[in-house]
Image: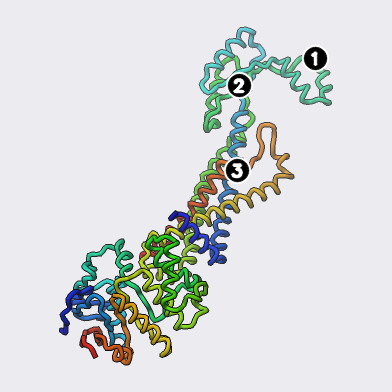
Amino acid sequence: MIQEPHKAAIIQMFHVHKYYGSKNALVDITLDISKNEFVFISGPSGAGKTTLLKLLYLGECVSEGQILLDGMNLSRISRRQIPFLRRKFGLIFQDYKLIPTKTVFDNIALVLEVTGKKSRLIQKKVKSVLRTVGMEARLNSFPPSLSGGEQQRIAVARAVVGDPKIILADEPTGNLDADSATIIFDLFKEFHARGTTIIIATHDKELIRKSGNRSIYLKKGCLQSSSTL
Amino acid sequence: MILSFFFKRAVQDILDNKVLNAITIFTITLSILIIGAFTLFFINTNDLMGAWEKNIRIMAYLKPTTPESGIQETEKKLKKITGVYNVRFISKKEALNRLKNQLKRQSSLLEDLNANPLPDAFEISLITQPRVWEKIENIARLVESIPSIDEVEYGQRWIEQFTNIFYLFKLTGYAMGGMFLMAAVLIIANTIRLVIYSRRSEIEIMRIVGATDSFIKAPFYIEGIIQGAFGSILGITILFLIFKYIFSNIAGEFSTHFFYIRFLPFAISGCTVVGGMFLGWFGSYLSLRQFLKL
């Protein structure tokens, strides 16, 4: 098993397995991701990239093995604690997952509303994060009226507005043209520079190569390599 | 503060999903309308039965040969019978006067009578008690066993039969009302489930951003309560309008000096609205419980 030593790991996986019935989605995964690391999870479709991310934010539970996340053992987390664990993450998806009936502002504000933040603070933070992603003019727009690239920028804004420790992005540029993908990727680099751990699942080898960051390569649910290209 | 936040969210959600919410409110309105109509019927039938029970009388006719002292003795005996509230002596003379009054224009028919054919009698009123009809026969038998009594009459024997039918009807009504209430809860739960199902991606997104179950549920509960309140107020209002329309013309014919048809009393209307709110909440609760398990 390939494992790289890291000083301060924020995520540690020990012999993690995930089964769906008789199908093995992940097999014996052991790896560390350190604080403020920028790491890719790559591999062909069906390799288990999405499953691995889901295990981290408890979208799914591990079948076997242990995951330690920021000092917490995920197997020991009760159902009630799951929302609080998820607040450590900023999640980004290929299909953006924005609420189409709510404005851009409301979509982003939701993250702060669930934590019970005061509305004045919410106003301030949402506007500030929209400025960062260059979408302040679309505050009152509804997601369906925006382009794919714009929607993903809103999704990024939503992911970072709560100051998460980790950003998990599942194929964030999969639906975007090259220019939009670059904008999104630059945003990730910016948040990484501010101290956030970034984990991106992608099958875009070019993106990984250009970034020069570590890549964890999965194939058929198994960890093949963990290296910097 | 938090409640007003959830309340605002709930109102916004209702406005965002007008059609489905209108369907839910309509379902609640219909349920309340039917349950309300049942209640209205029972309240009035109960009033009617109560009024009849209050006015129930036994007439005991004395043998013509009973002496004056026998009359007083009979009165004492009658008053001792359990269930008897009051005993009033009606002399044959008084009875004839009553008859004359009742006959009015035809009273001349009685003028040819040489002697008063009517007997002395006692009018016995009974203590109002539940299921008085079952006891009346026993009382009548006791009255009849007094030697000076010639004949006993309690003309409302048919009421007894009617009462039995009414009791049966009441039981069936409770059972049907209960079943209807259950059906209403299920229909409402299903309609609310449709609302929730149409917003499942929104719920999924809320969970992704770290919303607790109670944060997700609270607006739905408030929505259910608002829908219940609207639905039941609408139901009661429609029922009232129908009641007004029907009875403004014919209520007079049904009402008598001892009984009048009335609408649901304020307390029951209030309880129905609270019940409607509960129905809405319970519908949301059932749907969410199933939905959030997934």
How many angstroms separate mark 3 from mark 2 (CA)? Answer: 34 Å
B16 up-or-down from A3: above or below: above
Q: Left or right: where does residue B97 sit relative to residue A220? A: right
Residue B261 falls in which quadrant of the image?
top right
Asked whether residue B140 is in view, the answer is: no
Q: Disc 3, disc 1: CB below 8 Å?
A: no
Residue B228, horizontal then vertical, whole percent: 52, 54
Image side of residue A14 versus residue B181, left or right = left
Q: Residue at x 43, y 66 (%)?
A: A124
Query: Is disc 2 placed on a helix, strand or loop?
Result: strand
| Residue visible at 50% across and 54% down in the picture | B225
Local SS, label 1: loop
**A209 or B267, nearer to the observer:** A209
Identify the residue position indicated by label 3 in the image: B264
- In the rendering, at what x and y percent does residue A31 appear? 19, 79
Residue B10's label in the rendered image is none
Residue type (three-letter) at the residue carrying disc 1: Asn
Q: Position of residue B96 (x, y in %)?
A: 75, 18
Q: Chain of mark 3?
A: B
Q: From the image, which quarter does the N terminus of chain B lie in?
A: bottom left
